[in-house]
Each structure stands twice: as C-alpha cells, then as structure tokens.
C-alpha cells in the first residue's frame, strides 16, 4: 500500500495500516520528511504551536464533556435502590454465564468481568457502586477513544480542528445512544473500539497491533473483519497476529469455561439470541432487520448470509481504498460499521463506529460539507422516533436507523478522496452584500451573513423533522396544571369581556347550528395547519432559495417564542372551560369531570394555547405569500388563509380571540428578529441578491452594485474569479484541478 504521506504530507496519523513500511515515522509523530509533529508542532500553514496553550474554546468544550460525563454518573446514582442490577447484563456463575438470558458477551468477556460483580461487597456500598464504577470506566474509555481518534484525522489538520476535535468528539460520544447503552455493566463495546484504535494508530510494529485487534475480536467476534483489512492492506504479519490472538483467547476461554463456550459458539452460533431476542429493535444487524421484516427459516438465513457477504466485501474494498488514500480513520470506521452490520447480533451499543465516520468528507460545495456530520450526529444521538414520525409505513426505516447509517457508511456514502480538488477547497458558498438597516439604531449581527444559494435538501429535511419533534416534546412537557390553566382562561375571558371582543360563544353556537359550516371549519382546522406552511417552504426552497432562508428563520424564531408562552402561561381553551357551555366541534364532547379530558390529552398538551400557533403559522404563510407571490390572485389567496384560520379556531372553540393576537405577536417578533440579525429582506435583483433566471438560475448583478463578489466571500461566480481559478489550476499542472475550476465556473450562477 502506498504511504499515507503520498497524498497529504503524512503527518503521522497513518498508524500500522497507513505506513507502507511499518516504520518509525508513522508512530513517532513526525512527518515522512522528519518534520515537526503534526499535533505537537506547527499546523499545515506554519501557524503557532498547537500546544502553545489551550484556547478558551477548547477549555469550554472539555468542560462541556466533563459536565456530560458527570450527568451520566448522576443518572446512575438516581436509579432507585430496588432497581439496582435489575437491567444489568452481567454474566452468571461459571458454567451458567448465559443462564439468566441477559448477558450476551463472549465467554472471554464473561471470564474477565465476572470478578467485577463482587465490587459491591468489597466497597461496602452494595450494588450501586458497581453501576457507578462501570459507568465511570466506560466514560474514561470514551475519552481515550476520542483523543486517539482526534489524533488520527487525515492530514493536513487545521490548527483549530487539531485543538477542538478531541473535546468535541468526546462530548458527542458521551451523549450518543451507543455510549449510553454501553454504560450498562457487562457491555464491553467501547473497550473493543479502543483496542482497535490503539492497534491501528498508536502501537509500533505489526505484531503488537495485531495482538490488540485480535483481543478486540475476542471480545466482539465480528471485529475479526479488521484482520481482513490488515491483510488486504499488506499488513499480513499483523493480520496473522490478530488471527492467532483471537484463536488463542478463544481456546483459553474454552479451557476455563467449556460449557459456556459451547453455549456461545455452537448452541447459539456466535451468541445469536443471547443478551436479547434476535428480532429486538436493539439488534441493529442485517439478521435482526430481516427478522423484524417477518422473514424466518432457511430462506432468511440464506438471504442474510448473501447480504452479509456482499456488505463485508464492499466494506473491506472501500476501507482498503480509503486507507491507501491516507484516510485511515475513515477506513477503520467503514470496517467497524460493516463488522457490526454483518454480525448475527449487532447491538446498538456496538455501533460507536458510526460516529467515527464523521472523519469522511462528502460534497463538492462548502454548504454540503455539514450534511454528513450533522446526519451522523443526529442518528447516533437521537431516538429513532425523533428522527422519523410514528407512521406504520416508516417502521422498517425507523426501527433500523442505526443499521442503515452503518450500511451507508460501509457501502454507499461517496466520501471524497484526498486527491480530489474539492478535498481542501470545495466550491465556496455565495453570500450577498451586507444590507444596511432601515434604522440606524437597529444593530445587525455581522456573523449572520446573507446566503444566496439553496441549502442542502437532506440537511433541511433532517433539521425540520428534528426541530418539530423537539417542539412537540417541549410543548408536551410544558406546565399543564388544570387549576392554573382554568384560572388563566377566566382571566382571558374577563379581559375580552372588558374589551367587548368575547365573541367565542356566539360564533361557536352559530357554527354548531349550521351543519355545513361546522364541517368546513372542522376540516380546515385539522387539515391545513401543517400542510400549508410546509407547502410554502417547499415552493420557496425550489423557486426562491434566498427568500427561503429568510422565511424559514422567521418561522423558527416565532415558534421558539411560542414555546416560551406555553411554559409561562398555560391556558385552558374555551372547549375545556367548565360552565361556559362551549361545544368542541372537532374532538367531540369532553368530560370535564375527567382530568384527562379523553384521548386528546395523551396526544398533546391541551393547555398549550397561548399564543395560538394555528393562527400564527397561518399568518406567517399569509405574510410570506403576500410579500413574495408574483400575481394578485395568489396574494389574495395567501391573505385569506389566516382570515379563515382565525374564524376556524374560534368557531371550533379551540382558542380565544386573544390567542390569535398572541400568535400575531410572536410572528411579528420572528420577522423583527430576522430583521435585527440580518437586515431587511432584499427583493430579487436588488443589491446583493441575483435576479432569478430560467430554471432557478440566478443572474449575477453588476460588479459595483453590492454583488456577492463585493462581500469578499461569494461563490465563484464572475468571469474574473473563474479565470483566476482556472489559471491557478493550469499553473499547477493539475488536470483534475482545472476540471474542478471549469465546473465551478460553469455552475457559478446556480442558486443550488
């Protein structure tokens, strides 16, 4: 295999795989030419010493990681005393390691950790001390994994990345689902990851490295796939050492625990079914996914073996290619993801490899570089029901989110090679010129720059879904005291009577007596609350990307302000106010003597009514359509939507009139906040914003009229910038760079 230094300077991250000769350079911290240490010396641009003193940001991130770790320990201490060891996956006595059905590790793992079960008796604190000790050990191992992985990033590493990578990675892993699951006593997945990383990156010589990889495989047999990576990478001594270590550890465990070894290796075929049911959602392997799809018997086994073989082949092939390219950490992550996916039981706590895949880079545009890291972090840190709605049609995807992420990492995601001209210099994002505020006393935030290009669709969908899920959870967790909410309802009713706008009862009764009108308002109330805002956002994303960001930001800020209202002022809507005689036309009669008010209480917080986002979102849609729609009839339709919505929320007794006023206030504040952050919206073709052209192509404005180029950070969109880019590529003699420059020039005017 070619030396890692061949592609990027080889600053000492390659380890036993990346260094073609297994020489000292790969482990000594010096580059291939005897230069300074990649992490201890100067950065790629000859900047100041990276160890010259931790920056404030680095200290803050390490402090955040420490706080998260303390939170994990506190979580262990909060478990009630009668629940200690109730969910622990600890081995039973020798000869009966798997008798309880909870322990799923190898016999060697059981042999190694069985003495830990006596910690409670030795410490004098009972079983609680075992939980705390195991959680603490797991967090220490996580910190070690983060430090080793951060030092293994492919060169050249910018100084800021070298300083912040370790604390960021440790913090992300601490809150990830795999680590939270691995903190349960009896699970050794984090230790196996650390052993592999130490063997690949930190240990000198192939035999010691192979020994550590083999030891990791003895704890998690699927990781023997790393021996294949070593072999195919030309490290055959290390591969043989890993295989011998794996076999020797297995024989040692077999000699000490023959019955348990028979149970694990033969009776359960490499532990399948131990530690949980094979079809459990926690089993994020191909075998578990096929079982959850309803397949079983010989047909399922044949299909599983075929798919596992294909995934292992594709994953190893990609890993070898990335290792040869100098991206050894990415190669390790790809191999680890493939190993867990093809294992008969790939538990969620074993998929820490997915987070290590953030080392890969995808996308030619700078705006696309955030998509993969954000997607990986969301998948690894959030439950699947937050990422995807609870729909039956999405169950196969929702139940296998981590597995799909591992399969994508191993087989599908097109990571850029370091030889790509876009590796260091992606196509830059286009920014509009700063627009002065209408009022001198309104401060603009300089870091909120006006982006002209269309954002990445996948990233937008992920953020919208996660944002709405968090909104739903926060809304549901808002205070819902019945006495307080009804007291606030009486306050609102009194204020409306004083103002002469207490029209809710009259409107509600008039609608109840008019069947068609009741049906229309019920349909409008239940059907357009989500569809219209999403439709407006979709049209803006496709046809007006610059305005999409403006509209999306104002909607998001308005929603955040509404959440504050839900928490500070829980309010009973008219339909839930006893003694006032309102009829709930949408949900049917409510038994006000029942504190739960029927099934609707289980769906959402019924007292999250002030402000009304039903009206607020409708008003946002109306404002956006009236401002941006090119035709008069479209503006009229947009203006009618909030009018019909306010009639619907009052007629169905779901809101007071003042709730709609509150919705209008938060929407106005949302638009005002965007104005403060980035200045007023600029019409298409105005200063700093290209005029729309055919098929979404933007036409750059004059050079002297505040165009994106004048901001100093525009997308390569003018002929001068294109010529400079192509000229620099030609002077370097690089055909690939010239081709990239030509492509950037051709796509200069594209919005997306």
Image (cartoon, rainbow, N blue to C red):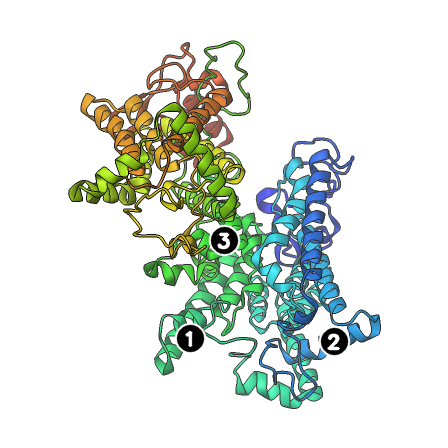
On residue 379, the disc is 3
Q: Is residue 672 visible?
A: yes
The secondary element bearing badge 3 is classed as helix
Q: Quadrant of the N terminus?
A: bottom right
Question: Where does label 2 land, which residue?
Answer: 117
What is the quadrant of residue 646 in the picture? top left
Q: Residue furthest left?
A: 516
Image location of residue 400, percent across then percent down: 44, 62
Q: Is residue 741 visible?
A: no
Q: Identify the mark nearer the N-term, 1 or 2.
A: 2
| Label 1–label 2 contact, CB within 8 A | no
Distance from the alpha carbon under mark 3 to that under mark 1: 26 Å
Mark in front: 3 vs 2: 2
The secondary element bearing badge 2 is classed as helix
Question: Where does label 1 land, which residue?
Answer: 305
Image location of residue 692, percent across then percent down: 29, 23
């Amino acid at each position: 295999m070619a030396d890692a230094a061949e592609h990027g300077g080889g600053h000492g991250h390659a380890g036993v795989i990346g260094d073609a000769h297994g020489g000292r350079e790969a482990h000594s911290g010096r580059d291939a030419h005897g230069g300074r240490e990649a992490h201890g010396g100067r950065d790629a641009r000859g900047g100041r010493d990276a160890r010259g003193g931790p920056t404030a940001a680095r200290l803050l991130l390490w402090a955040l990681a420490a706080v998260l770790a303390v939170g994990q320990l506190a979580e262990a201490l909060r478990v009630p005393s009668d629940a200690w060891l109730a969910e622990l996956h600890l081995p039973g006595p020798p000869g009966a390691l798997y008798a309880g059905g909870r322990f799923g590790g190898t016999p060697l793992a059981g042999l190694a950790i069985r003495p830990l079960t006596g910690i409670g008796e030795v410490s004098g604190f009972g079983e609680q001390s075992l939980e705390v000790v195991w959680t603490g050990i797991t967090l220490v191992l996580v910190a070690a994994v983060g430090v080793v992985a951060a030092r293994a990033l492919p060169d050249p590493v910018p100084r800021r990345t070298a300083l912040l990578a370790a604390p960021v990675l440790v913090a992300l892993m601490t809150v990830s689902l795999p680590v939270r699951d691995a903190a349960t006593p009896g699970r050794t997945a984090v230790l196996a990851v650390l052993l592999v990383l130490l063997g690949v990156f930190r240990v000198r010589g192939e035999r010691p490295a192979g020994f550590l990889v083999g030891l990791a495989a003895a704890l998690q047999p699927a990781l023997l796939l790393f021996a294949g990576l070593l072999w195919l990478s030309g490290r055959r001594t290390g591969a043989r050492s890993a295989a011998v270590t794996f076999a020797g550890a297995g024989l040692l465990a077999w000699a000490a625990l023959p019955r348990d070894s028979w149970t694990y290796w033969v009776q359960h075929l490499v532990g399948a079914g131990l530690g949980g049911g094979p079809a459990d959602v926690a089993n994020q392997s191909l075998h578990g996914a096929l079982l959850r799809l309803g397949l079983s018997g010989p047909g399922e086994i044949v299909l599983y073996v075929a798919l596992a073989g294909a995934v292992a082949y594709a994953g190893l092939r990609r890993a070898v290619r990335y290792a040869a390219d100098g991206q050894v950490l990415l190669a390790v992550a790809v191999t680890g993801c493939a190993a867990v996916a093809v294992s008969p039981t790939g538990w969620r706590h074993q998929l820490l490899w997915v987070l290590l895949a953030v080392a890969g880079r995808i996308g030619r545009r700078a705006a696309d570089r955030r998509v993969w890291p954000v997607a990986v972090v969301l998948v690894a840190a959030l439950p699947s029901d937050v990422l995807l709605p609870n729909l039956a049609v999405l169950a196969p995807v929702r139940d296998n989110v981590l597995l799909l992420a591992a399969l994508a990492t191993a087989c599908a995601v097109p990571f850029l090679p370091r030889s790509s001209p876009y590796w260091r210099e992606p196509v830059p994002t286009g920014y509009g010129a700063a627009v002065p505020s209408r009022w001198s006393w309104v401060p603009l935030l300089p870091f909120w720059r006006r982006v002209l290009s269309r954002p990445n669709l996948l990233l937008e969908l992920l953020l919208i879904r996660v944002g709405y899920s968090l909104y739903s959870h926060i809304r549901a967790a808002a205070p819902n005291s019945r006495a307080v909410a009804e007291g606030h309802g009486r306050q609102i009713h009194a204020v409306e009577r004083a103002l002469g706008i207490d029209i809710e009862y009259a409107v509600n009764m008039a609608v109840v007596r008019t069947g068609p009108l009741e049906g229309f308002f019920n349909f409008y109330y239940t059907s357009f609350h989500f569809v219209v805002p999403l439709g407006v956002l979709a049209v803006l994303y496709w046809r007006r990307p610059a305005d999409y960001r403006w509209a999306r930001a104002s909607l998001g800020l308005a929603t955040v302000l509404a959440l504050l209202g839900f928490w500070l002022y829980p309010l009973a809507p008219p339909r839930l106010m006893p003694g006032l005689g309102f009829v709930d036309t949408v949900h049917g009669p409510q038994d006000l003597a029942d504190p739960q008010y029927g099934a609707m209480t289980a769906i959402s917080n019924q007292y999250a009514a002030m402000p009304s986002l039903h009206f607020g979102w409708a008003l946002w849609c109306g404002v956006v359509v009236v401002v941006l729609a090119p035709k008069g009839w479209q503006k009229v339709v947009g203006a009618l939507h909030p009018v019909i919505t306010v009639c619907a929320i009052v007629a169905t007794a779901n809101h007071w009139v003042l709730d709609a006023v509150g919705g209008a206030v938060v929407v106005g504040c949302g638009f005002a906040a965007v104005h403060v952050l980035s200045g007023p919206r600029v019409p298409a073709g105005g200063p700093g914003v290209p005029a729309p052209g055919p098929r979404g192509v933007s036409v750059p404005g004059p050079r002297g009229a505040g165009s994106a180029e004048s901001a100093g950070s525009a997308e390569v969109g003018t002929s001068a910038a294109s010529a400079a880019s192509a000229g620099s590529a030609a002077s370097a003699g690089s055909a690939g760079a010239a081709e990239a420059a030509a492509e950037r020039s051709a796509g200069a005017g594209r919005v997306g």
